[in-house]
Amino acid sequence: MKTISENRAFGGVQGVYSHASEACGCDMTFGLFLPEEAEHEPVPVVWYLSGLTCTHQNAMEKAGAQAWAAQQGLALIFPDTSPRGADIADDEAYDLGQGAGFYVNATEGPWAPNFRMWDYLTEELPHRLFSAYPLDEGRQAITGHSMGGHGALTIAMSFPGRFRSASAFAPIANPSASEWGRKQFTAYLGADEAKWAAHDACLLMKKRGFDGPMLIDQGSSDQFLELLRPEALAEAAASARQNMIFRMQKGYDHSYYFVSTFMEDHINFHAEALYA
Amino acid sequence: MKTISENRAFGGVQGVYSHASEACGCDMTFGLFLPEEAEHEPVPVVWYLSGLTCTHQNAMEKAGAQAWAAQQGLALIFPDTSPRGADIADDEAYDLGQGAGFYVNATEGPWAPNFRMWDYLTEELPHRLFSAYPLDEGRQAITGHSMGGHGALTIAMSFPGRFRSASAFAPIANPSASEWGRKQFTAYLGADEAKWAAHDACLLMKKRGFDGPMLIDQGSSDQFLELLRPEALAEAAASARQNMIFRMQKGYDHSYYFVSTFMEDHINFHAEALYA
């Protein structure tokens, strides 16, 4: 694990680290905020998965989460959104290739060798983190924004017992039925839609749901509402009788101003579950 | 006044606007956060002046001030740090020219025609803001970071009665005795050091001080300590018996992680003065 930077923040440390990734076949970078409490004992963890075009850096700098995590004694993990590098496949579009991994294991060329964000985030990175840092593997929560909300919800539902709570800001909620999903799943997973189902929060909700509380915030003035399909998630969750708070926030858009506005609520929501 | 963007944030609106500036002879852009209360009545104002290389955008996105300003019902103004444009004088160094206006009126060529940030911030922009937005001109406070801390302190002390409180994060405290100051003052104001005195917080402190409370935060691990000279300000303020809280924050550096960590304290400090 290589240290890129460490800055004191809110009584703890905001670090950026990189490592050679087996899953992705390239160096991967992530941000980790450790609160002051981590000097003495392992602390609970909130994963934050970012959206299209983002790196580990955007949320770390703009979401304002450290203030609330420090108050609650929680660590924050900010992974990158895809493999990166000159040798890694890419596309001219902002929503395919580097910066747009969509949190799946690609099976189709040219993506298959490196675009394995599912394995990276659910196996490799946890293994590295919990052996290297004072983090409590038994107390994890997960959240994310947009494409990262999609990742957070699908990962949470796919690993029962791993996360005590899950939340999302304006998630891509139903990618199988959206151009933010169909395009990428076709490229990464192939044309057989049966293989997409494991990566669609609405379909997973209908099939198994999540064994903990969920919180979803969505701005009513989000410029991407038709691509996000929040109504499909609201319907699926209510039909499944999922323990979920779904909030339509009047006048908010898709930006980090929206995310930061409601970050305090999300961190406190996860803290309640993590300290229960 | 041209609207560049408006995003709902923390119950209010984070806007970015531009206008043709007479003082600077070019278009100038600024950020303005209006809390929800501004829908009903003029609200008190906190000015935030930014540091070297920054635009209006850095603090707006990374300082986390809106959360606390919204709680206190305060507006935030984020001006740019210099005139900008292809026709505006510049220098290859990051600390001279565009992005490095140092909050003075340049008298020397090639800077004199446009680098008039002092007049812009103390005359033109206030005039425009208070006539266009629901802001309470009678309740103003000012803060800033690094070069912006220098600007905040020198402007606060130069306009008695205008600002009820003043604060700074790691300010350039004694530019007449620092290479962050001597270089720029020589370029902008000329070699006669007598003309620099009006723009040195330590010299102003000894001469007249500030007629309200001041708060200074400085990281003990700041990589620029020798350029900032906080010890000179601490000495000058204590000698002047200035109403000031000066805090040396152990382990913090010069970054926005430092600024955001202590932003809540600064906003609350100004709120106490503005609502007294």
Image (cartoon, coloured by chain):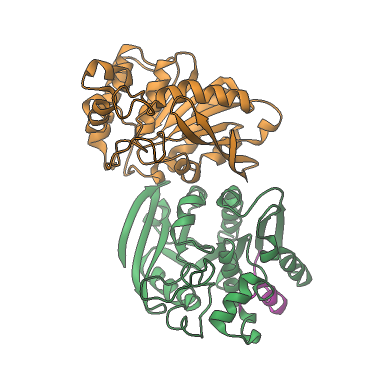
Chain colours: A orange, B green
- On the image, the x and y values in percent for residue B241 come to 76, 69
At 47% from the left and 46% from the top, the residue drawn is A62
Write the start and end of the magenta stretch as one range: B199-213
Image quarter for residue A12? Answer: top right
Q: For the N terminus of chain B, give its image quadrant.
A: bottom left
Q: Between residue B61 and residue B128, name the one nearer to us.
A: B61
- On the image, the x and y values in percent for residue B194 come to 65, 86
| Vertical arrangement, residue A250 with respect to residue B214, above or below | above
Inspect this view and state whether residue A217 appears. Answer: no
At 75% from the left and 72% from the top, the residue drawn is B240
- On the image, the x and y values in percent for residue A172 come to 31, 31
Image quarter for residue B181? Answer: bottom right
Q: Is residue B202 magenta?
A: yes
At 48% from the left and 69% from the top, the residue drawn is B92
Q: Between residue B91 and residue B78, name the one nearer to us.
A: B91
Q: Is residue B174 left or right of residue A81?
A: right
Image quarter for residue A249? Answer: top left
| Vertical arrangement, residue B128 with respect to residue B254, above or below | below
- On the image, the x and y values in percent for residue B244 come to 70, 63
